[in-house]
Amino acid sequence: MAYDVYRGPVASAPASARAEFIRKTYLHLAGAVLAFIALEWLLLSWNGSRGLVEAMLGRSWLLVLAAFMGVSYVADRWARSDTSRGMQYLGLGLYVVAEAIIFLPLMTVAAFYSDPAVIPGSAIMTGLLFAGLTFTAVTSGVDFSFLRSALIIGGFVGLGLIVASVLFGFSLGIIFSLVMVGLAAASILYTTSNILRYYRTDQYVAASLSLFAAVALLYFYIVRILTRR
């Protein structure tokens, strides 16, 4: 059965359709990562980036987070759209742009006020962790959907602490970042397991967005840990 014809769940798809879904998902993930790198480089090279960072920080950071969450929701809905493939790519592209902007303050600190080697070093660590977690999720045969409740609760707790730190002016230390790295790792396990079991074979754009979100979260907090060091 041809891949373009079969549009059922990946878990029950023929082997050729599963292989094509996995190939397209990770190719799109690689494309999203490369686009993120290019956008971040352009933002860091832009003369007005320092002013944008200053405008984003302080109490304004709550507005930035709210806008990011809203854009993320819209991007995910577009990436899951059954209307057109173009809408799906627009959703993925919108999310990559949003991630590049939300990363800008942290990357500015890492690039100009810390050891610049933190950026590629964090990327290598993230890649190795992602590869290991993906291998575990794919080969273990375990359905990691049981992590969903923990991820939701952990996400709300983490967001609450971030909001409280901005409102009351306290710093979230390295322990918080380590916990968030654990949350991101669990998210990669959950997302990888989820897309292989419950996504349709034509939802590879949405699958790549979900994986990119988890990888970006992992990378963010690894950079934060190494920068604080």
Image (cartoon, rainbow, N blue to C red):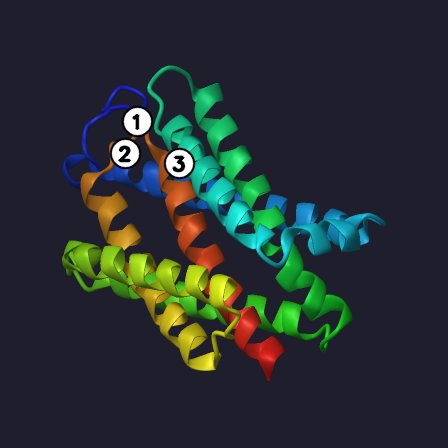
Q: What label sits on residue 3 in the rendered view?
A: 1
Q: Earlier in the sequence, mark 1 or mark 2?
A: 1
Q: Nearer the viewer, residue 142 or 117?
A: 117
Quick one: quadrant of the N terminus?
top left
Mark 2: few/some/many CA within 10 Å (<14, 14-19, 20+): many
Which residue is located at x 75 percent, y 73 percent?
113
- Give the amino acid type for the residue marked by disc 3 in the picture: Tyr
Residue furthest to the front in view is 168
Q: Secondary structure at mark 1?
A: loop
Residue 182 x %, y %: 34, 71
- Residue 107 appears left or right of 22: right
- Give the amino acid type for the residue marked by disc 1 in the picture: Tyr
Determine which quarter of the picture holds residue 218: bottom left
Q: Earlier in the sequence, mark 2 or mark 3?
A: 2
Which residue is located at x 65 percent, y 59 percent?
105
Q: What label sits on residue 17 in the rendered view?
A: 2
Q: What label sits on residue 73 in the rendered view?
A: 3
Quick one: quadrant of the C terminus?
bottom right
- Residue 97 appears left or right of 156: right
Determine which quarter of the picture holds residue 226: bottom right
Residue furthest to the top in view is 83
